[in-house]
Amino acid sequence: MLSFILRRILIAIPTLILVSMFVFALQKLLPGDPILVMAGEDRDPEVIALLREKYRMNEPLVMQYIYWAGDVLRGDLGISLRTNEPVLDLIASKLPVTIQLAIMSMLFAMLIGIPAGILSAVRKGTWVDWLANVVALSGLSIPNFWLGIMLILLVSVNLGWLPASGYESPWVDPWKSLTTMIMPAFVLGTALAATLMRHTRSAMLGVLQADYVRTARAKGLRARVVILKHAFRNAVLPVVTLSALLFGELLAGAVLTEQIFTIPGFGKLIVDAVFNRDYAVVQGVVLCTAVGFILMNLVADVLYVILNPRLRTAQ
């Protein structure tokens, strides 16, 4: 197992290097000059020259990347041009918000998608299967921003059950934090639930035809035991892997959802940074998002090996 993890980490290293190059090059392609923004309205040539020298902007592009990568390895992602705060501090303040939203969204997705997928596979060809597929297709088709606006109008404006927007830390007010995150988490969770439902159904349909499932039924075991203990335990492997990858996508930040519900997470941070041409923040957020997604890929691979005894013996 340890050798497998080490191999996956070694594979992830060149991926991280390529991602860092892409992030750095992407920043250079963005319109505008951050040095001119920092110089202010006067744009004194001497100030501009000093700033270019300070931030090594007068160096060749390759040297700029090497300097930037070296700073990143030391934990220095630069300074925000707008707030003059370290980018690492900004990310550290927004990351818990995005993690909370991602966890709640995955809970909704798993509580809805996995049971629906199991029922759809067990009741294949019935109205239950048809209804589950219609709901899954709707979840994939309905845009998140439209569903979020409709929920705000219905639940917040008309019924007054939940706040329409805002955010409160769970360490300050757990109940208020829960109420402000339920709707955005549900909006994100429904789309993920549709994906999980389809994969769970597909995996269950394959497993239900296996010989050991037919043997378990022939022994007279209850249907619930056959489905949950024998069939689902083997069908859950691709579902767990997919869940880890979907969680990695959520860590990237749900831009539209966070904007609609005014949640100060990664999505809102990068949107504000792009509009304000805060290039250091854009670089930092994209790089951290890519690292998080690569880590979740690694977690998915490790979970697959842990849950599959045949792969464990092969290592």
Image (spheres, helix red, strand yellow):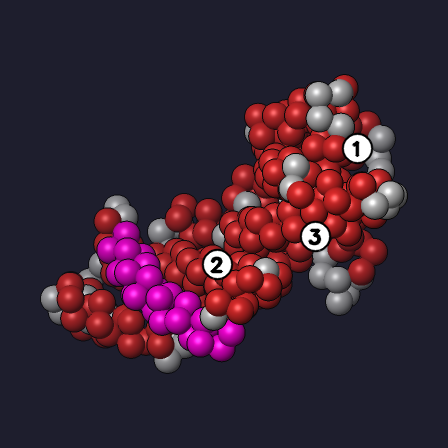
Q: Residue at x 30, y 66 (%)?
A: 14
Along the line of sight, the residue nearer the viewer: 52 or 65: 65
Q: Which residue is mark 3?
A: 233
Q: Position of residue 34 (x, y in %)?
A: 28, 57
Q: Are marks 2 and 1 in contact (CB under 8 Å)?
A: no
Residue 151 in which image quadrant: top right
Distance from Cα at disc 2 to Cα at disc 3: 21 Å
The answer to whether residue 88 is left or right of residue 117 is left
Q: Which residue is mark 1?
A: 155
Q: Earlier in the sequence, mark 1 or mark 3?
A: 1
Q: Secondary structure at mark 3?
A: helix
Numbered range of the magenta stretch: 1-26
The answer to whether residue 61 is left or right of residue 107 is left
Distance from Cα at disc 1 to Cα at disc 3: 37 Å
Q: Residue furthest left?
A: 60
Q: Position of residue 136 (x, y in %)?
A: 65, 29
The answer to whether residue 313 is left or right of residue 31 is right
The amino acid type of the residue labelled 1 equals: Val
Q: Residue at x 53, y 69 (%)?
A: 313
Q: Secondary structure at mark 2?
A: helix
Classify mark 1: residues with Cα within 10 Å, few (<14), some (14-19) or many (20+): some
Q: Is residue 22 magenta?
A: yes
The amino acid type of the residue labelled 2 equals: Asn
Q: Residue at x 67, y 22 (%)?
A: 134
Q: Earlier in the sequence, mark 2 or mark 1?
A: 1
Q: What number is the disc on residue 297?
A: 2
Q: Are marks 2 and 3 in contact (CB under 8 Å)?
A: no
The answer to whether one can see residue 286 in this image is: yes
Q: Residue at x 27, y 48 (%)?
A: 30
Q: Secondary structure at mark 1?
A: helix
Residue 291 in which image quadrant: bottom left
Residue 294 in which image quadrant: bottom left
